[in-house]
Image (spheres, rainbow, N blue to C red):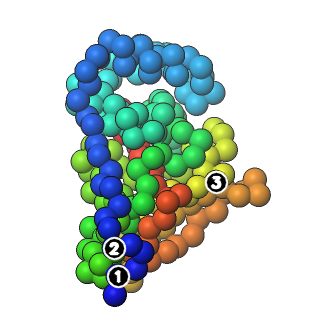
């Protein structure tokens, strides 16, 4: 017997096309200039010159799903990263397609999965190291959690990693890849 009410959770929708490119770039520039601590020794022109149409569409997908993306130096590399205080609005999702299929087989219908959504958006899930680096720029996921890129060994055993910040400490945990919660999404990264 299915758990819950048996109705699917609405699928997470990705919108990559940018309607007003100039307006969106201006919005990104304002965020960039308001958060210089995330990208010291980097100018807006450094970022703007790397935002071709394909990358801009990926950043737009991050924005329209609540990621508040900004240019961030992660492990000495300039990237666009989801910088919303809590995990982006792409939630109620399993870790990957295999985990999602396992839930559907039981009559439970999540809103998608982190791996496929990231691929559709043209971004990567943050690794544990990247997630910890992001936390150096602020306090993220203080009420939520985010799926993280998971090693093959852990995934082959049915698990997946996620992280959050509680008690002024960054924690990384594990869960079954088929689990999903209303307060767990994922943070993505786009290498520039």
Q: Nearer the viewer, mark 3 or mark 2?
A: 2
Q: Secondary structure at mark 2?
A: loop
Q: What label does residue 6 carry, if any?
A: 2
User: For the view shown, which residue lies furthest in the front direction?
Assistant: 5
**Horizontally, is 50 left or right of 127 in the view?**
left
Name which of mark 3 and mark 1 comes first in the sequence. Answer: 1
Q: Quadrant of the C terminus?
A: top left
Q: CA distance from mark 2 to mark 1?
A: 6 Å
Q: In the rendered image, which residue does mark 1 sit on?
A: 2
Q: CA distance from mark 3 to mark 2?
A: 27 Å
Q: In the rendered image, which residue does mark 3 sit on?
A: 143
Q: Are marks 2 and 1 in contact (CB under 8 Å)?
A: yes
User: For the view shown, which residue lies furthest in the right direction?
Assistant: 167
**Horizontally, is 138 left or right of 28 in the view?**
right
Q: Are marks 3 and 1 in contact (CB under 8 Å)?
A: no
Q: Are marks 3 and 2 in contact (CB under 8 Å)?
A: no
Quadrant location of residue 61? Answer: top left
Q: CA distance from mark 3 to mark 1?
A: 28 Å
At horizontal 47% and vertical 30% (from top left) the residue drawn is 71
Q: Secondary structure at mark 3?
A: loop
């Amino acid at each position: 017997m299915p758990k819950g009410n048996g109705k699917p959770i609405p699928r997470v929708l990705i919108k990559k096309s940018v309607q007003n490119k100039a307006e969106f770039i201006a919005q990104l520039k304002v965020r960039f200039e308001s958060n210089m601590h995330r990208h010291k020794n980097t100018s807006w022109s450094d970022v703007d010159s790397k935002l071709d149409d394909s990358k801009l569409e990926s950043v737009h997908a991050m924005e329209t799903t609540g990621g508040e993306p900004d240019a961030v130096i992660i492990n000495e590399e300039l990237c666009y990263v989801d910088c919303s205080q809590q995990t982006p609005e792409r939630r109620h999702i399993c870790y990957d397609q295999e985990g999602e299929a396992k839930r559907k087989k039981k009559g439970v219908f999540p809103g998608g999965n982190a791996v496929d959504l990231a691929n559709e958006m043209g971004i990567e899930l943050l690794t544990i190291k990247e997630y910890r680096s992001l936390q150096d720029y602020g306090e993220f996921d203080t009420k939520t959690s985010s799926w993280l890129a998971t090693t093959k060994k852990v995934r082959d055993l049915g698990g997946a990693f996620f992280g959050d910040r509680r008690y002024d400490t960054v924690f990384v945990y594990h869960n079954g890849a088929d689990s999903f919660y209303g307060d767990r999404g994922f943070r993505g990264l786009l290498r520039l």
